[in-house]
Amino acid sequence: MKILIYRDYGCSDVSSLYEGLMAYFTSVDTEIGFTDASEIKAGVLDKNVRALFLGGGAGNPFMQKLAGIGNDRIRAYVENGGTYFGICAGAYYACRDVVFEKDIPELRIENQCGLNLVEGRAVGTLYKELNILPYSLTALSAKIVHVRFSDGEIYPALYHGGPWFDRTNGSVLACYEEAGGKPAIIEKRFGWGKVVLSGVHFEESAETLKKRLHSLRFDKDAAEQNANEMRNGEARREKLFDRLMRLL
C-alpha cells in the first residue's frame, strides 16, 4: 500500500507531513511518496493507494493544475474506496465553496474549485478571532490553537490560514477552542471512500517549527513563541497526529 502526498505548483513545504507519515508508518507495510498533477491525471490513484494528502499552500494553483480530469480522477479514487486527507489549503480545495479573507479586497477569494467532495463552505481565515494578522507567509499570521473533540479531548496544533467549515455535510470531529467552537476538523463518506479535512497543521511539531526560525526574519519573536508553545504541548500534538492517522 502507498500513501501519496501532493507536491506541485502552489504547494507549501510538505516536509513535515512527509517526516511525520514516515515515522508513524515505519512499522507497517506502507510506502510514503509524492505525486503531482500530471501523475494524477495519468491514473496514479489506483487501489494500491491508501490515502492522498493535499497539504498547505494555495488553492487557486491547485485548481489551475487539477481542474477537469485531475479533479475527476481524485473524485473517482475516493468514490471507489480511497481516502482524501486535506490540510489547510487542501481542506479548502475539497469543499464546494471557498470563502477566503472576504473582507480584505486584495486577498479575497470566493470561488468553487470543482473537486466538491464536501458540500458547504470552507471559510477563512480566523485572524480576527485569534488576534493575528490576515494570512501571509509569516509567523505573525500563525498561532498555536487548540481543537476540542466531541469526547472532550483537547489538542494543540498550528493554525496558519486554514478554514472553518460552514454548513457542510460532513461530521464535525473537532472544533476551534479559541474561535467560538467553529468546526476545525470534519470527516465524511464519499461513495465507498472517505474524506478528512483539517483546518489546522497537526503535522507541524515543535522541532519543525524551530528549524524554520531565521535570525534576520522580522517575525522571529512570533515564530519563537509558536515553537515554544508547541514544545510545551508536543506530547498532546503527537496524540492528535495518532488520532487522525487512525482514520485512514
Image (tube, grey):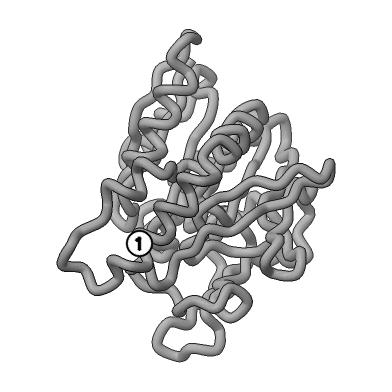
Res 123 → quadrant? bottom right
Asked if one can make out residue 76 in the rendered structure from this viewpoint, the answer is no
Give how far across and how far down residue 111 sits, in percent. 54, 73
Asked if one can make out residue 101 in the rendered structure from this viewpoint, the answer is yes
**Viewer-proximal residue, 152 or 34?**
152
Q: Amino acid at mark 1?
A: Ala
From what the image shows, is residue 184 above or below residue 80?
below
From what the image shows, is residue 216 above or below residue 36?
below
Give how far across and how far down residue 14 sits, in percent. 35, 43
What residue is rendered at 58% in x and 42% in y?
75
Give how far across and how far down residue 40 sits, in percent. 40, 37
How many other residues sit within 10 Å of disc 1, few (<14), some (14-19) or many (≥20)?
Answer: many
**Viewer-proximal residue, 247 or 225?**
225
- Is residue 242 toward the left or the right of residue 159 in the image? right
What residue is rendered at 48% in x and 54% in y?
229
From what the image shows, is residue 101 above or below residue 216?
below
- Is residue 207 toward the left or the right of residue 120 in the image? left
**Viewer-proximal residue, 147 or 135?**
147
- Is residue 217 toward the left or the right of residue 88 in the image? left
From what the image shows, is residue 157 above or below residue 50?
below
Q: Identify the residue at the far left of this view.
A: 216
| Residue linked to disc 1 | 223
Res 180 → quadrant? bottom right
Res 77 → quadrant? top right
What residue is rendered at 49% in x and 66% in y?
161
Give how far across and how far down residue 136 sits, in percent. 37, 73
Label 1: state its secondary structure.
Answer: helix
What residue is rendered at 24% in x and 74% in y?
218
Point out the image quarter for the C terminus. Answer: top right
Q: How many marks?
A: 1
